[in-house]
């Protein structure tokens, strides 16, 4: 294993342990959405809640269980999108999906900067079965955003 791979491994282990955004937040916001996603092939489960204030993502919180890739990925997602505009979150989401489809190669453009700690998941792209683990939190986020934007009442 190269030192870069070891560093990436460490980033994933740290996020899996620390779980940024873990614990569903009670939200006193107008636009709130929630999504529950399950990856049956691995046994991962994530429930994620978002709160919007106009175009700004005020809150991203979640609870879940499963492998360290699934739990670390949603922790990284929290750091990347909370406090950001919807447009920036969508750009990060697209970049992460592209990274997962890049078969272990970095994107090689300015979006590698956009991804921050999510770049550590580059190696996951070599293992199709693990891509589902890494994408689970992002799928929950995408769905929760759709729910939140419907909820304009
Ligand atoms: Zn998994």
Image: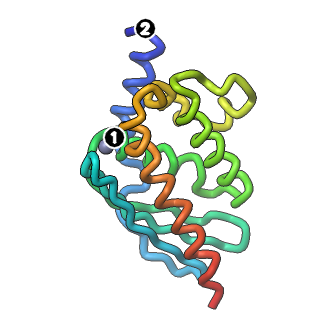
Give the residue at x 58% y 29%. Answer: 102
Q: Nearer the viewer, residue 101 or 68?
A: 101
Quadrant of ligand 1: it is top left
10 Å crowding of disc 1: few (<14), some (14-19), many (20+):
many
- Residue 61: x, y in percent? 44, 62
Identify whether 85 is placed above or below 118: below
| Element assignment for label 1 | helix
| Element assignment for label 2 | loop
Q: Nearer the viewer, residue 93 or 40?
A: 40
Residue at image mark 2: 2
Give the residue at x 37% y 56%. Answer: 22
- Residue 91: x, y in percent? 70, 48
Identify whether 102 is placed above or below 88: above
In the displayed orientation, state which residue is furthest to the top.
2
The first of marks 2 and 1 along the sequence is 2
In the displayed orientation, state which residue is furthest to the bottom.
153
Give the residue at x 53% y 34%. Answer: 117
- The image's mark for residue 5 is none
Quadrant placement of the C terminus: bottom right
- Residue 105: x, y in percent? 57, 21
10 Å crowding of disc 2: few (<14), some (14-19), many (20+):
few
Residue 66 left/right relative to 128:
left
């Amino acid at each position: 294993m190269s030192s870069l791979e070891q560093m990436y491994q460490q980033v994933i282990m740290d996020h899996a342990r620390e779980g940024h955004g873990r614990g569903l937040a009670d939200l006193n916001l107008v636009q709130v959405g929630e999504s529950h996603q399950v990856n049956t092939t691995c046994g991962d489960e994530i429930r994620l809640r978002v709160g919007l204030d106009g175009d700004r993502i005020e809150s991203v919180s979640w609870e879940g269980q499963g492998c360290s890739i699934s739990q670390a990925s949603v922790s990284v997602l929290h750091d990347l999108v909370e406090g950001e505009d919807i447009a920036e979150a969508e750009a990060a989401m697209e970049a992460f999906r592209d990274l997962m489809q890049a078969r272990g190669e970095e994107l090689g453009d300015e979006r590698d900067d956009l991804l921050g700690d999510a770049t550590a998941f580059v190696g996951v792209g070599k293992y199709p079965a693990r891509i589902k683990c890494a994408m689970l939190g992002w799928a929950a986020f995408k769905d929760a955003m759709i729910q939140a934007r419907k909820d304009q009442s």
